[in-house]
Amino acid sequence: MLVWVNAIINGVLIGLAYAIAALGLNLIWGVMKVINLSHGAFIALGMFAAYLSVKLLGLSVYTALVPIFVGGLAVGVVAFFVSLYRVLNEKELTTLLSTYALSLIIIGLGTFFFTTNPRAIDTHLGSFTLGYSSISYARIIVGLISLLLAVALYLFLFKTSLGKAIRAVSQNPTASKLYGINTTLVLSISFGIGVAFAAVSGALIASLFPFTILSGSVYELKSFVICVLGGLGSPAGAILGGLILGLLENILTLKIPVDYMPFIEFTILVIILLIKPSGLWGRR
Amino acid sequence: MKKLIVFLMVVVFAMLTTKAFAKDKILIGFTTSLTGKLNAESKAQLQGLQMWANNVNKNGGIYVKSLGKKLPVALKYYDDESNKERVQQLYVRLINDDKVDFLISPYSSDLTATAAIIAQQYGKIMISTGAAADDIFAKGFSVVYQMYTPASRYLTGALDMLKKYDPKAKKVAIIYEQSEFAKAVCDAAKSYAQKNGFNVVMFEAYTPNTTDFSAFLNKMSSLKPDALIGGGHFADGETLAKQVYEQKIPLKLISLIVAPAVPKFTEIGEAALYVTAPSQWEPEVTYSQDSAKKLRLPYYGQSVKWFTDTYRNTYHQEPGYHAAGGFASALVIQKAIEETGTLDSNKVKQALDRMNIMTFYGQIKFAQGKYHGLQIGHEMVYLQWLKSDNKLVKEIVWPLSAANAKLVFPYSTKFKK
């Protein structure tokens, strides 16, 4: 019985971290209908930003989240103007290619500077025992911070004027422009927030698992699955999708071999696309 | 005048033939990966071989009774660029052009498999080192001999160790990387476990880039195994050991291939403590005249201390099992030549076939019959990370004949502090 409790707790905690990664992807899609293929690269950058903050600056990985978020926001705004702004109204394939190019550049530079050797951040926080195994405090902290970030994003989008502007632009860019909203600014900030979420989720994941500069792609793929599950463009859907994925990974595997998981995840993905393409929580 | 010419011709011919037939050195040929991906391991293996040759020559060479004198040894080697095609060309060249007396294998199972075919084709004796694959020796080769303990016995010692320290321990979990080597090791460990009355409660593979083992470990927890064995390569094995520690899973024994044998393993700190791993050889092994006597085997060659000290002094680094394997592979040829007193391939082969000796590298005995040449004497040693003066040190804990420290058992002792 305790094993199940353990699996559920682990599933929820890791699911929340997945959700934060997916939220970044989701927000960018929701606001500007761009599938950001550089998402994984920004997650990896977040991992290395956390690693360098801990190793070079001696910061705790959790304190480092603040500068990583701010840095991610700034990098995201710059990246928007460099790679997206001029092609935003082109066909979807163009924005796909431009974000993919950005990803190649980041990964290429990252490989040059950091090599593909695995790194790890040691949090040394210990764990508490539950039944035959334990849950580490590091996981609990990651889960709580993720929850906090999700709530903060919700409050920002629904309670602040900038958040409302973002939602307005996402629903009707032309009407927003007519109402005097600086849509370019709003779009760039949205992209910045998306990148900042990717970077922070990378830092959070790096506090739990070892990583290389190529690790981002694993979580990028998970983010896609989560977005499709929960509904592209729906922040609440991303949380729901993350939780479902985390729980599936931890509970189902108690009874079936772990390496069946990708098969099951992608089967669910195909089924959702076939019967409810807008996702479980998505709007049409 | 005619007579003089004939006489001179006879003299010249006699000089030429004696020169051609008089052996002035024993030539040992091999390729080594001076470049390419196998460069690091190959270099250590080459250093072991060079150290052997220097030492033999310092003592005047190997005594060959049929010639009534000592012959120096010479190593003839080429760079195979870690490439199979090069191995094929170069071994033919070593045999046909350089006319080497004996062959040593390149490094790695892949390259050795290629070299073995050439050696067999030309009937030239080859000692294989740096190659653990079993299947090379299932092909009926009659002149190829293996120095490494084969992959199929990499983890069986861990099960013997568990049985010895806790005869009641029955449940074993095997979690391994989806790679050819790890799968071969773990398939063999699984069938050995079942044959020996263990219950393999979990047998699962993970993809090579896995970083989150919680699903595996959670499932393992629910099955309450006594021991965890498996692993794959460095990064994944290190993470697995770390997450077992974080989850405080009360295991009695944990034994992983590759990762814990690498000194960098200590970077995970406390998580490395009491983890065990198989290794072909470690500088801490205690093979000696005494341990040979206990097994009623003759001891041959230098001591472990001599090897370790000389290697350190020569190359200014710690010897690992690649270097030891290189040295030992040539030592085996030396023993067979000395025993038979000849360089004749057939006689040397017979000596190798009946060889059963103890050396600084451990016991050496080759299988006969279907798996001719497979190493059946040499045992993996098991190292365990222990604490001494608050620093992590690796010590040999198994087999008991080679151990220099007592296994800390169970692994979970560390959670009770």
Image (spheres, coloured by chain):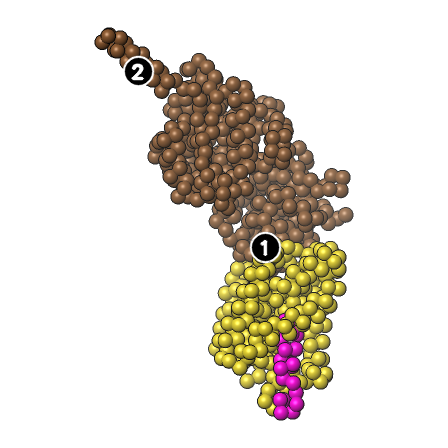
Q: How many marks?
A: 2
Image location of residue B59, percent across then percent down: 54, 19
As drawn, the chain in yellow is A
Of residues B390 and B171, the one nearer the viewer is B390
> Crowding at label 1, few (<14), some or many (≥20) Cα neighbours within 10 Å?
few
| Separation of marks 2 and 1 at Cα, in angstroms | 64 Å
Q: Residue, x 42% and y 24% (percent of image)?
A: B348
Image location of residue B383, percent across then percent down: 63, 39
Bounds of the magenta span?
Answer: A176-197
- On screen, residue A193 above or below B16: below
Name the main secondary structure of what is drawn in magenta: helix
- On screen, residue A99 above or below B387: below
- On screen, residue B350 above or below A168: above
Q: Residue at label 2?
A: B13
Disc 2 marks which amino acid? Phe
Q: Residue, x 52% and y 75% (percent of image)?
A: A95
The answer to whether marks 2 and 1 mark residues whose Cβ atoms lie closer than 8 Å is no
Q: Residue, x 68% and y 56% (percent of image)?
A: A121
Q: Chain of mark 2?
A: B
Q: Chain of mark 1?
A: A
Image location of residue B408, percent across then percent down: 69, 40
Q: Colour of chain B?
A: brown
Of residues A144 and B61, the one nearer the viewer is B61
Is A186 in the magenta? yes
Q: Residue, x 46% and y 19% (percent of image)?
A: B71
**Residue farthest toward the left in the current orientation of the protein:** B2
Element type where label 2 sits in the image = helix
**Residue farthest toward the front in the current orientation of the protein:** B1
Disc 1 marks which amino acid? Thr
